[in-house]
Each structure stands twice: as structure tokens, then as C-alpha cells.
Image (cartoon, helix red, strand yellow):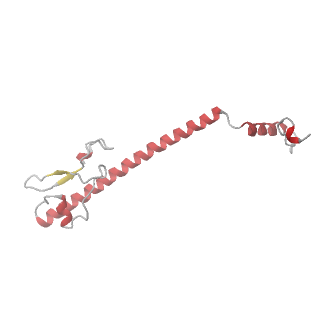
């Protein structure tokens, strides 16, 4: 009678350590059965919780990075406006004038809207641009709207 035609029985390894029979049987039985549905569901729940937390943290970091870029861009534009005023005694009429006069290398882009759509604030007396703000009205991480930064 061939070995493969006999009814399938669990293979039992010979014990290497005396008195260790139950451990070997339990290990071979677990290897033959695989994972239960409950075990798979628990693993999937744990993975989904970890992915949710990671996604939340990444989204928060992206917002912080955009806000930091916005603050830096506003500082650069405001410094350029001040430099222009110091040199010429008047404010520029457009932001494009800051670029053509070489106070800025390129037209600044709002990192929140990805466009050069700044809210222009005129000076108290005269005409031109005294200050710029973001066009986004949403509140930032500080609670103050981006348009007030």
C-alpha cells in the first residue's frame, strides 16, 4: 500500500526533549490549521487604527508646512515692499513692479491657493501696495483667518 493513498493523518515529529510532547503537538496542529477569522479581523482592526493615526498626523504636518511657507512668503514680500519704499519714497503699484525692479525674483505664490492671488492693502495716504495678505478666509492653526496674517 502506497504512503499517499493512506488516509491523511497529522504528522508527529519525534520528541527531542523528554516530556515535550504536548508542545510539539500544539505547534504542528497550529501550523496545519492556519489563522482563524477572529485573528485576521483583530489584525485588520489594529492595522486600520494605525493607518488612521498616521494619516491624521501626516495631514497635520502638511498643514503646518503650508502655514510656515505662507508666513515666510509674507515676510519676504513685506520686506521687499519696505525696501522699495525706502529706496523710492513710494509704494509699488503692483506686485509685478517688485519683480521688474528686482526686489523679488519671481511673483510670490500663495501656498494655500497655489496662485498669486494676494489681497492688497493700500497705504494710509497715497496709492500702491503697503501690505499683502492671503486670499484664504479659513481659520489657521492659531484660530485667526489666514487673510489676517
Residue at the top extreme, as displayed: 38
Question: With respect to residue 104, does 11 lie above or below?
Answer: above
The image shows a total of numbered marks equal to: 0
Relative depth, front residue between 97 and 79: 97
Residue drawn at the location 40% of the way across and 45% of the way down: 60
Residue 106 in the image, given as x and y percentages of width and height: 25, 63
Residue 104 in the image, given as x and y percentages of width and height: 23, 64
Relative depth, front residue between 88 and 12: 12
Residue drawn at the location 85% of the way across and 42% of the way down: 13
Question: With respect to residue 101, does 131 lie above or below?
Answer: above
Residue 49 in the image, given as x and y percentages of width and height: 52, 38
Question: With respect to residue 56, does 73 lie above or below?
Answer: below
Image quadrant in which you'd find residue 95: bottom left
Residue 124 in the image, given as x and y percentages of width and height: 10, 52
Residue drawn at the location 15% of the way across and 55% of the way down: 130
Image quadrant in which you'd find residue 142: top left
In the displayed structure image, the side of residue 65 where residue 97 appears, left or right = left
Residue at the left extreme, as displayed: 126
In the displayed structure image, the side of residue 89 where residue 74 appears, left or right = right
Residue drawn at the location 13% of the way across and 58% of the way down: 93
In the displayed structure image, the side of residue 86 where residue 27 appears, left or right = right
Image quadrant in which you'd find residue 9: top right
Q: Looking at the figure, which quarter contains the N terminus?
A: top right
Amino acid at each position: 500500500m502506497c504512503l499517499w493513498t493512506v488516509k491523511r493523518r497529522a504528522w508527529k515529529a519525534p520528541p527531542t526533549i523528554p516530556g515535550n510532547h504536548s508542545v510539539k503537538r500544539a505547534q504542528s496542529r497550529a501550523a496545519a490549521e492556519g489563522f482563524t477569522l477572529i485573528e485576521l479581523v483583530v489584525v485588520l482592526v489594529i492595522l486600520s487604527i494605525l493607518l488612521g493615526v498616521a494619516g491624521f498626523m501626516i495631514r497635520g504636518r502638511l498643514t503646518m508646512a503650508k502655514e510656515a511657507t505662507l508666513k515666510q512668503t509674507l515676510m519676504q514680500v513685506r520686506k521687499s515692499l519696505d525696501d522699495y519704499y525706502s529706496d523710492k519714497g513710494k509704494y509699488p503699484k503692483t506686485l509685478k513692479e517688485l519683480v521688474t525692479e528686482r526686489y523679488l525674483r519671481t511673483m510670490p505664490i500663495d501656498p494655500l491657493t497655489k496662485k498669486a492671488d494676494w489681497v492688497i492693502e493700500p497705504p494710509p495716504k497715497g496709492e500702491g501696495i503697503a501690505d499683502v495678505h492671503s486670499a484664504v478666509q479659513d481659520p489657521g492653526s492659531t484660530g485667526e483667518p489666514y487673510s489676517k496674517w
